[in-house]
């Protein structure tokens, strides 16, 4: 079960939404040292030491599920707020 579950509605085409995800994750990749990989056209996996997750695009929303290790669970609130901010900035 994920430690963090977020979703953000959008009204973009799948191609536009994917471009926004690429831009958002590129920034997070450099800021947080994430390793990112598209699994298919609408699902992206990401991981770094102590955390991993999946971002899923649908026609109307983007969803993120994150699992945190024991050490990062203490920072869950901060991580969740930063993810929410990144989603709102990209899709809000």
Image (spheres, rainbow, N blue to C red):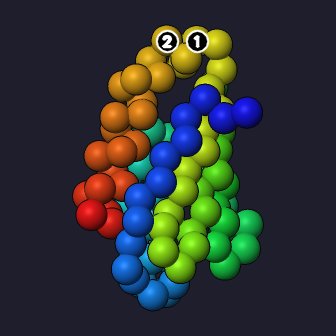
**Which of the two residues, 83 or 61, is positioned nearer the viewer here?**
61
Residue designated by label 2 = 74
Q: Are marks 2 and 1 in contact (CB under 8 Å)?
A: yes
Q: Is residue 71 above or below residue 39?
A: above
Please name the residue shown 40% across and 23% down the image: 77
Residue designated by label 1 = 71
**Which of the two residues, 42 or 35, is positioned nearer the viewer here?**
42
Give the side of residue 10 with respect to residue 40, left or right: left
* Residue 78 % position (x, y): 36, 25
* Residue 29 % position (x, y): 47, 50
* Residue 30 % position (x, y): 41, 48
Please name the residue shown 36% across and 55% down the image: 87
Q: Is residue 54 visible?
A: yes
Q: Is residue 26 visible?
A: no
**Which of the two residues, 21 or 62, is positioned nearer the viewer here?**
62
* Residue 83 % position (x, y): 40, 43
Q: Is residue 18 above or below residue 84?
A: below
Please name the residue shown 44% across and 38% down the image: 32
Q: Nearer the viewer, mark 2 or mark 1?
A: 2
């Amino acid at each position: 079960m994920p430690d963090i579950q977020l979703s953000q509605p959008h009204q973009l085409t799948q191609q536009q939404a994917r471009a926004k995800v690429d831009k958002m994750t590129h920034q997070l990749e450099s800021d947080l040292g994430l390793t990112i990989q598209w699994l298919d056209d609408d699902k992206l996996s990401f991981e770094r030491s102590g955390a991993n997750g999946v971002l899923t695009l649908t026609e109307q929303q983007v969803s993120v599920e994150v699992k945190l290790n024991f050490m990062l669970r203490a920072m869950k609130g901060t991580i969740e707020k930063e993810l929410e901010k990144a989603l709102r900035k990209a899709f809000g």
